[in-house]
Image (cartoon, rainbow, N blue to C red):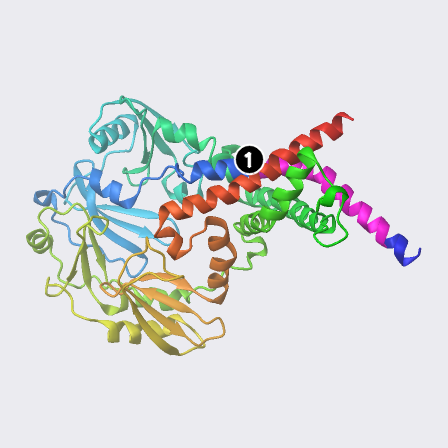
Amino acid sequence: MPRSDIGRVALRWLFLTHRWAGIAACLFFGMWFASGLVMLYMPYPALSPAARWAGAAPIDWSRVDVPAPLATGQGRLLLEMRDTEPVWRIERDDGVIDTVPARNGAVLPAVDHGYARRVAANFSGTRAIRADQVMHDQWTVAGGFDRHRPLWRVALGDAAGTDIYVSSATGLPVQRTKRVQRIWNWLGSVPHWLYPTVLRQDNAAWRQAVMWVSGPCIAVALTGIWIGILRLRPGQRRYKAGRISPYRGWMLWHHVSGLVGGVFLLGWIVSGWLSVDPGRLFAGGTAPVEALRRYRAIDGDTGLAPARLAMVAPDARTIEITNAAGLPRVVVDRASDHPRFLDARTMAHPGDATAVIVKASAPLVAGGALWRIDRLTRSDAYWGLTRPLPILRLRFDNHARTWLYIDPATGDVVERQDRARRLYRWMFDLPHTWDWLWLVASRPVRDLVIWLMSAFGLVVSVSGVWLGYRRLLR
């Protein structure tokens, strides 16, 4: 077949692929753009750490007489109330939660129907009217709730239609939804993330669905941009009446909006496809397990008698004990607006421990040496506006160019970034959520940009669906 014929055949298949695959793709495009605008103002329901702290009861120190148990670097060690009983809680890395009574001879009640209703009512200050046990539902389908299953869903008798979810593992509230959130999220997060319970509860199946739905949509966007450029005549060889596009009516709207917003649409779709990290390209590395355990090991010999803790934090709602980097610390009400960080040996505010943290962190990054230390007091491209400050950033020269973000007050490793994770920030976060620092700091400007680009995307989508519908009728 002559080369010219091959070109014509290829061009025809380009048009056919875009035409017929585009009908389904434009339905998804329209759904994603419209639901994304909903998500801009109504995020997915979540019970934030600050909200959990605000609803928690103060620790009843008169009932605390059991010292902190040995945790040996397995996870987080906390003291808090479980209904009317104080408990020590170890949240392990493998998802297991160990709860130990903080009062000698105490027997913790089972998390049953009556318990869940009582805890939810105390947490919210509102009467509980119903409690049902659920394994999964639309608002607790994510894997982060697995350690708390089965959950008790408690309906409150308030005007907002609030549901509180109580963990069967900890006996504490772990999720809260309101009627208006549930309604709007069926128009926002659920369709945008392809998040119905029946699909999302199987994480592997959900990831495959996202990849195989997004992948063809990327092909449609690419072919559309290519065709749009091919059909454009901005120079001297214009169409009749000096037009640069051969189309009219709906086709003209589709052509122009696709050219103007096509790059933005393509960036959004590609970054959405990358959200599930196909092939685990951006998984990044992890610290050696034993090295991390030694780094944050709690040795259980800090002299933290309950009476001593009660003296320095009489009104505390949560106490967290850490020994990261060999720095014994007591953290009082970490999730509040006024957290306190104390040296567990002196019960005074800790001094600068940067040198100790730097020395202890070296084994966490194999095959590399520390080459730069930053103390961040302002957000940057890799540490957003909502992240805690100040923070230590330790940069290593290993093959993956690992950065460790470490809390200077406690020595806790807050985040680990390598080259792959930083690339993911540029490939997904920035083009998909428009999490640019200057835009996030100027919310009206960011909203305006997203609305403008989404408008082009909706015009492309709606016009594509209508054109496809008319062609199918023919």
Residue at 6% across, 53% down? 311
Q: Residue 377's image quarter?
A: bottom left
Residue linked to disc 1: 31
Residue 415 colored magenta? Answer: no
Residue at 27% across, 57% down? 71
Residue stretch in magenta? 7-30
In the image shown, does 441 or 320 lie closer to the viewer?
Answer: 441
In the image shown, does 431 or 376 lie closer to the viewer?
Answer: 431
Q: Is residue 177 above or below residue 71?
A: above
Left or right: where 88 falls relative to 470: left
Left or right: where 20 falls relative to 77: right
Left or right: where 101 falls relative to 40: left
Residue at 23% across, 28% down? 121
> Label 1 is placed on what type of residue?
Met
Question: At which x and y percent is residue 228?
Answer: 69, 47
Q: Is residue 121 above or below residue 411?
A: above
In the image shown, does 153 or 442 lie closer to the viewer?
Answer: 442
Q: Residues within 10 Å of mark 1 (few under 14, many from 20)?
A: some
Residue 29 colored magenta? Answer: yes
Whether residue 212 is visible: no
**Which secondary structure dominates the residues rendered in magenta?**
helix
Whether residue 132 is visible: yes
Question: At which x and y percent is residue 136?
Answer: 44, 33
